[in-house]
Image (tube, helix red, strand yellow):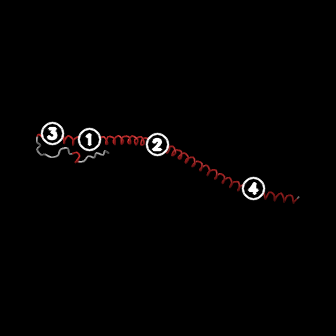
Amino acid sequence: MSDMKLTNERMMTFVGHEKIGTLKAAEKLMEFGDKQNLANEALAANVNDLIKRVCALEDANEVLVANINDLKKRVGVLEEKERRSSETVKKLTGDLSMAKRELDRVRLTSKLNSSSIERLNNAVRPSAGKAEKEEKDESADK
């Protein structure tokens, strides 16, 4: 801001309502003119300072608007990345679920096959043992 502060005292250019004689009128008019010039200078300095401040604020505002627009673009890019990541996670979740079902099926099949093989093996062992016994008995009879 300007050093020329606008105060009521400084802006008062006419003081008094006394009657002025013709001889003093020029002197009073000159005094009034000087005071008015000082007030005008103070006003002009303050107006110029305000214009400078407004220009600086407009420049700062332009920078901020550019930053906001850049941030909006970045947010848009991030939202797109988040959407794609979300879709990828959904696909991976589906694939993982399908793989888990397949693994469970394979485990179940393996377990069933192991149980079937074990039952067949157990079924074959006693009959194999009987067959060997019979062969031994037949050889002993000869």
Q: Is 27 placed left or right of 82 in the picture?
A: left
Which quadrant of the figure has residue 60?
A: top left
Q: Secondary structure at mark 4?
A: helix
Real-space Cα separation, disc 2 to disc 1, in angstroms = 49 Å
Looking at the image, is mark 2 or mark 1 nearer the viewer?
1
Single out the mark in the foreground, 3 or 1.
3
Element under label 1? helix
Q: Which comes sooner in the sequence, label 3 or label 1?
A: 3
In the rendered image, which residue does mark 1 sit on? Answer: 41
Q: Earlier in the sequence, mark 2 or mark 1?
A: 1
Q: Considering depth in this image, is 126 or 141 the residue closer to the camera?
A: 126
Q: In the picture provided, is 137 more to the left or to the right than 49?
A: right
Identified by mark 3, the residue type is Ala
Could you tell me if the residues under marks 4 and 2 are in contact, i.e. CB atoms within 8 Å? no
Query: Label 4: few (<14), some or many (≥20) within 10 Å?
Result: few
* Residue 74 tag number: 2
Residue that mark 4 sits on: 124
How far apart are the two marked residues, 4 and 2, measured between alpha carbons?
A: 73 Å
Which residue is more in the foreground, 77 or 108? Answer: 77
The dot on residue 26 is: 3
User: At x 30% / y 40%, what residue is drawn?
Assistant: 48
**Does 90 appear above or below 127?**
above
- What amino acid is labelled 2 in the image? Arg
